[in-house]
Image (spheres, coloured by chain):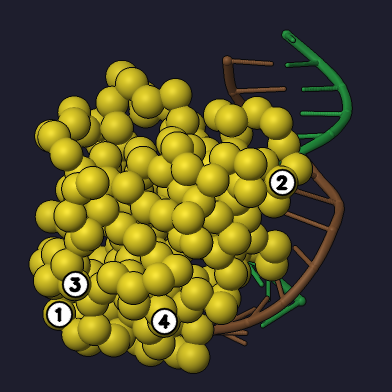
Chain colours: A yellow, B brown, C green
Amino acid sequence: MSPRLARQFFDRSVHEVAPELIGATLLVGGAGGIIVEVEAYHHTDPAAHSYRGPTPRNAVMFGPPGFAYVYRSYGIHWCLNFVCEAEGSASAVLIRAIEPTAGLAAMRRRRGLPDERALCSGPGKLCEALGVTIKHNALPLDRPPFDLRARAGSPEIVTGPRIGITKAVEHPWRYGLKGSRFLSKPFKA
DNA sequence: TGGGCGATTCGCT
DNA sequence: GCGAATCGCCCAC
């Protein structure tokens, strides 16, 4: 088993951390798999929740790195982020897609879907599959129920514009595992 | 294969 | 009141 990611792993620029999360293994309560798609959000970025300063919702982003920031999206879905950089810098990586490898039965049950490819292929989907809710907000990533393992090799990374945002759309801050069948959407060649 | 739309909560204007 | 870091379904092509 590869080593657990230390808290210091997140105490760097989101643009360093985000691509290094591709290929890492994320389990929540024993269910999850290999991270294949993420997006980086920096506090100077108009598309980031932290751009306009702290609020009750985004408070965790302004705390120390290595914690989970969970928020509700479109009134329905949960989205999972990892807080990065020094305390107060309010930057985070959005986890967008996972290749399921562990706890398949539990994830299928929660998703109500038999298709493995659709289990975790989107930020809202993977939270439902892994059982992530607001209860996980502000929890440390180096302790249960989270289990985050460093990747083994150096996978090929593809980049592209982020999805579903209206501001700062030009930045290529979406990172994916090249050729993965489990992405939320394909990367443009 | 891809675009349009409804569901539904919350933060901010 | 508006719009959002989404998803799944429906429809046209």
Q: Nearer the viewer, residue A129 or A42?
A: A129
Whether residue A13 is situated above or below residue A118 in the rendered picture? below
Q: Nearer the viewer, residue A18 or A168?
A: A18
Earlier in the chain: of badge 3 and badge 2, it is 3
Q: Amino acid at mark 1?
A: Ala
The image position of residue A14, as x and y in percent, is 20, 61
The image position of residue A99, as x and y in percent, is 43, 36
Q: Residue A133 vs residue A101: left or right? A: right
Nearest-to-viewer mark from 3 and 1: 3
The image position of residue A112, as x and y in percent, is 75, 43
Mark 4, Cα crowd under 10 Å, few <14 / some 14-19 / many 20+, is some
Name the residue that disc number 3 marks.
A7
Name the residue that disc number 2 marks.
A109
Residue A143, quarter of the rendered image: bottom left
Q: Is residue A51 visible?
A: no
Name the residue that disc number 1 marks.
A86
Earlier in the chain: of badge 4 and badge 2, it is 2
Mark 1, Cα crowd under 10 Å, few <14 / some 14-19 / many 20+, is some
Name the residue that disc number 4 marks.
A138
Have a look at marks 3 and 2 and say if they share a chain: yes
Q: Residue B3 vs residue A48: left or right? A: right
Earlier in the chain: of badge 4 and badge 3, it is 3
